[in-house]
Image (spheres, helix red, strand yellow):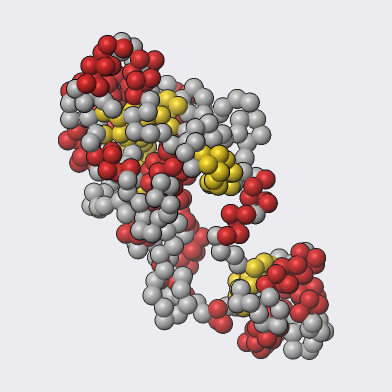
Amino acid sequence: MSEALGEIVVVDLTTEFWGSLGVALLADFGAQVIRVETLPEARERREVRDAGDAPASWNYRFELANRNKLSLAVDLDRAAAREIVERLVRQADVFVTDRPRRVLEDAGWDYESIASLKPDIIYARASAFGPKGPDRDLPALDELAAARTGMMPIMPQPGQPPVFAASGQMYTVVMLAFGVVTALHHRHQTGEGQEVDVSLFGGNMYGASLDIQAFLAMGGERFLHPVSRLDAGNPMSGTLYISKDRRWVTLTMPDTDRWWPGLAAILGLDPHDARFDSHEKRCDVNRLELIRVFEEAFSQHPGEHWRTLFSERQLSADVIEDYSFPANDVQALRNRYILELDHPHLGPIKTLGFPIFMSDSPARLDRTAPCLGQHSAEILHGMLGYSEAEIEDLERKGIIA
């Protein structure tokens, strides 16, 4: 099978997990991604783990964000190392970074400097709040961006603190890859390179796009405050009910006239009950009474009982799961959303797979995340034409690793 991005060379100068993961998506579809790791801090960065991570040898964040990449480790404070990266840029199609704008300008890695080396380069930057405006230099932290989108206060039940879902960075990851591919398509048509910026602020807003768009269209206080599950307008859509084994059941049946007979049947209710025999009664006149009836009915059996009945009746409902479900779900494995593989150092493991299916040029896991500088000599000799003696000299002087 062919690789969708097999002819694309990407220079990856990212440092944050979400920025690196966006580049990994390009590598998954065949782009040759060269991760430039700056010495000596790259050694320390590789050791960063979340509190409580185990086992100690499994740096899962780094593994996910850097699979399918090559590692070039250089000391960018040295002129010879800078020359290496500049020569690499001249052969690249894409340059990606998530470093602060001022750091890039001071180091000469800003768009204008990189474009002077390769005029048709696609220069992509993952930022905090976008390339313009008074807040463009704020720290690129997902929670700070999420705090400004309006979603955090409306997610919990009333009276509870705002909830940080930590999902905005995942939208931004996909935006980064999409922006790069779109710019590459434009270059293919016009021969022009350009600058691409995707921000955590924009990614978080996109994640909340339905609610933000509704507020922009209608305004009003109802979009600004959390809604109790008991205040939902439709007991059969968006309202949660707890089962006997304390698992939550979610119903997604906005058209209650369509779904009511089947739902009533599995709950042991009379579909002709005069209290609930119309959409208006179910969602307005007797809404609270129906919620009470549903709560009582769902509490009689465990979640798996309800899932079985939902499936048999083909009802639009399910049981809310924790992370153990997708980790072992046949559907996730068959579609390669979860991969099972033999890691060269860790043995059999599971890891996240690929969120995009393509029939003729699918994503592939060709290599696990590289060791520091694993491909330095290979890149210098094979791509940039350095001799073995020159490479040995650079290693001896600590310019590369």
Q: Is residue 319 left or right of residue 135?
A: right
Q: Is residue 387 above or below residue 95?
A: above
On the picture, is 97 further left or further right than 239?
left
On the rendered image, what quadrant is the N terminus found in? Answer: top right
Q: How many marks?
A: 0
Could you tell whether 104 is left or right of 365 in the image? left
The quadrant the C terminus occupies is top left
Which residue occupies 61% across, 59% down? 325
Residue appearing at x 44%, y 62% in the figure: 165
Tell me which corner region of the image, top left, top right, bottom left or bottom right, holds residue 229. bottom right
State the residue in front, 75 or 223: 75
Locate residue 167, reporting x and y percent.
45, 56
Q: Tell me what residue is drawn at x 67 percent, y 45 percent.
A: 334
User: Which residue occupies the foreground of this view, 151 or 300?
Assistant: 300
Q: In this view, does 222 lie to the left or right of 17?
A: right
Closer-to-camera residue (269/255) = 269
